[in-house]
Structure formats: structure tokens, C-alpha cells
Image (cartoon, rainbow, N blue to C red):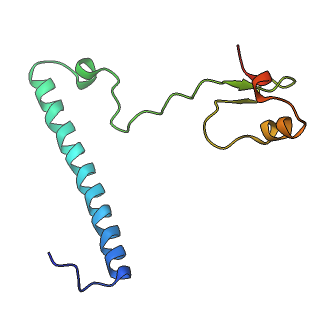
Amino acid sequence: MDLSGYSISELNKLKTDIEREVRQRRKQQAKEAQRELKAVADKYGFSLNELVGNASTGGGQKAKAKAVYQHPEDPSKTWSGRGRRPRWINEWEQQGRDIDELRVS
């Protein structure tokens, strides 16, 4: 497929359309696979849940990162050291304090 004649906006629309179609087809394939698995489980006298447990098809959530730093006066305020620094960390350092003082032991 030669894409050299397409403008950037046309390519972006094509990309969006392709991504949408891929998502729809994957969803349909997952439903079909689930139907087939259920049929096999039924054939042998099992429920699908008995064979695969509580496996979810939607993907699980990531575990929350452990707290590395904790506010000295409000223990509910924590930070894992990843991502954007919370305001209270910045304020702590602006007071000339060392962030290591907040480290959870």
C-alpha cells in the first residue's frame, strides 16, 4: 500500500480508523474465543470459571507503588518517588529541609 500521496491529516484519520477497527476485531475475537472455551468446558462438564478461576479479560490494575516518602505531620500524604513531586515535597525543600528526612524507614 503506497501512502506517499496522502496528506498528514488523511494519514491521521486513516490511523484512527485502523486503530478503531483493530480494537473492534480484537473484542470480537475475544468474545468468540470465550464462546469456544465455554463450549469445551461444557463438553467436559466444567464451568469456565472452574477451569480458569476468576481470570478477567479486561486486564487488572497495577499495584500501587510503595510509599518511599511520608509527610511528618499528615501520614496520609505519601509519595513513591516516581512521577511528579507533590506540592508538600516541594514546600519541604523550599524550607531548606532535606528530602531524606521524609524517607519511610
Q: Is residue 3 left or right of residue 15?
A: left
Q: Residue at x 42, y 33 (%)?
A: 60
Q: Residue furthest left?
A: 43
Quarter of the figure that contains the N terminus: bottom left
Residue 19 is situated, as x and y percent measured from the top left of the image, at 31, 62
Taking 102 as reference, is 95 above or below it?
Answer: below
Residue at 88% x, 35% y: name it: 96
Task: Name, please, the residue furthest toward the top.
Answer: 105
Would you say 72 lies left or right of 53 here?
right
Which is more toward the observer, 20 or 87?
87
User: What is the quadrant of residue 69 in the picture?
Assistant: top right
In front here: 97 or 79? 97
Instruction: Please provide percent x and percent y for residue 28.
Output: 23, 51
Residue 9: where, in percent of width, then height? 38, 81
At 14% across and 18% down in the image, what residue appears?
Answer: 45
Residue 103: percent from left, percent from top: 73, 21
Residue 66, placed above or below residue 33: above
Displayed quadrant of residue 78: top right
- Residue 53 falls left or right of residue 99: left
Tell me which residue sits at (33%, 81%) in the image: 10
- Residue nearest the observer in this picture, 59 or 77: 77
Label total for image: 0
* 29 and 75: which is toward the camera: 75
Where's the C terminus, which quadrant? Answer: top right
